[in-house]
Amino acid sequence: MSPSDLVARTKYCLNCGRRLERGHGFKRTRGYCGWDCYRMKPPKMAYVEHEYNKPVREVVIDSLNRCSTEVAADLLGISRFALYQWIDKLNIQRKVIWQ
């Protein structure tokens, strides 16, 4: 299942979980109840959350702890620039501890 399939098949908003309305003027294939929900969690984030069954923040932190940013971006299926945007959006801070 790809992110576009996830968006097309859902009956609930991918961010807040509200039931999506159907009928004239409402497109269920949109996957979100509004633009605010879309901006908070884009389809790729929702897809990663669906695939790993964990919140996106935990998935990103785990992948960054295991490997470099380039490899973590490849594992998540996004570009390195997108990973840096996700890190900013999720307010993840890098902390290096030397021993």
Image: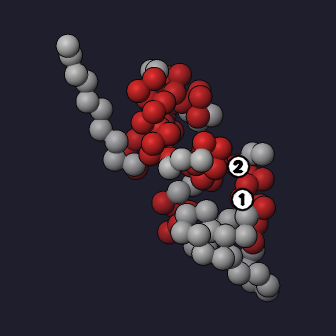
Q: Which residue lies furthest to the bottom in this view?
A: 24
Image spot of residue 84 (x, y percent): 43, 37
Q: Which of the 4 quarters of the picture holds residue 65?
A: top left
Report crowding for label 2: few under 14, some 14 to 19, many 20 or more residues within 10 A (C-alpha).
some
Q: In front: 74, or 96? A: 96
Task: Give the residue at mark 1.
Answer: 7
Q: Residue 3 carries which label?
A: 2
Residue 44 visible to an observer of this rendering = no
Q: Residue furthest left?
A: 99
Please report the residue visible at 76 percent of the width from the left and 81 percent of the height from the top.
22
Identify the coloring: secondary structure
> Quick check: 64 above or below 88?
above
Please report the residue visible at 66 percent of the width from the left and 76 percent of the height from the top.
19
Image spot of residue 9 (x, y percent): 78, 61
Q: In front: 53, or 83? A: 53
Q: Which amino acid does label 1 sit on?
A: Val
Q: In front: 97, or 32? A: 97
